[in-house]
Image: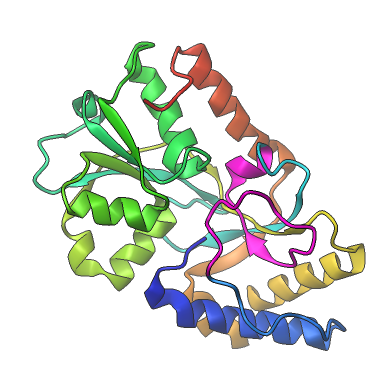
Amino acid sequence: MYNFPEMRADNARFWRVLRGLLVESGLPDTPEALTFERRPVPDRLEPELLFSQTCGYPLETVFKGQAIRLGAPVYAVPACDGPTHCAFFLVPVASPAQCLADLRGGVFLLNSPLSNSGMNLPRRALAEIAGGQPFFREVIETGGHPASLERLLRGEGDAASIDCVTYAFWKRHRPEAAARVRIIAETPPSPAIPFVTSIATPPPTFERLRDALRAITSEPRYAAVREGLMIAGIEDVPDDAYRKLLDYEREAAELGYPRLL
């Protein structure tokens, strides 16, 4: 999920270590390299999927029953409290907006209608002030958080809701660009984006994956691997926590704001 081009080496190193642990545990046919070309929200999660990281909202909707959660990362970034995250409403530095209400009638940049941080969480936040009416003049779908950020900088929209972990990586790798936007509000919290495997993954393989992740996130020799991806640990998060994302959906509808518009 977090894959700016500048992060390719960090993600590849994480996978090399994880793959090595899996091979040592008895999975010799583990793929040698990660696939970076997949869309953040593909059409489905294939039965042969061994390892990925998938947004929590699609897991409860379009991907329901297609994956098993392996654990939720604890990110060492602002606005993450344990295995949680939220999204930031970002505007250009020169924007006159000071709070969410100031965005009414503007143009919103949406990464995906299936995104938790880009759609579901901001929808719940905006439902409190939308008054049961469309809030934005226009919503433009961009295809991803990085694309939303780029278009925000080009002046093609007034605001975007960006996952706080994505924002932290953006600040690390592109500080000059990040300095051109500011945060005006946060969304409600959400469980962190979990690591997953296919529902068809055999139980012994599932356990090997969990054990390998725990090793990476706990053993001192992997500290540099963790730091590259800002991961402080990994925790089990109960299913009820992710079902809360559907509560946000229901609550927004009850407030008369079922669609982010």
* Magenta stretch: includes residue 51: yes
Main secondary structure along the magenta-highlighted residues: loop
* Position of residue 57 measured from the top left corner of the image (x, y, whole percent): 59, 40
Residue 210 visible: yes
52 to the left or right of 25: left
Q: Position of residue 64 (x, y in %)?
A: 73, 41
Apparent side of residue 167 relative to residue 204 in the rendered image (left or right): left
User: What quarter of the picture does the C terminus occupy?
Assistant: top left
Instruction: For residue 78, say whether it is visible.
Output: no
Q: Read off the magenta span.
A: 37-60
Q: Nearer the viewer, residue 149 or 25?
A: 149
Left or right of 193 on screen, residue 257: left
Residue 210 belongs to the span the image colors magenta: no
Front residue of this view, candidates 146 and 169: 146
Q: x%, y% of residue 31?
A: 71, 80
Say above or below: 224 vs 88: below
Residue 76 horizontal side relative to residue 176, left or right: right
Residue at point 39%, 11% (across, down): 132
| Residue located 49% across and 34% down the image | 120
Q: Residue at x 59, y 84 (%)?
A: 222
Q: Residue at x 43, y 57 (%)?
A: 165
Looking at the image, is 88 positioned above or below residue 224? above
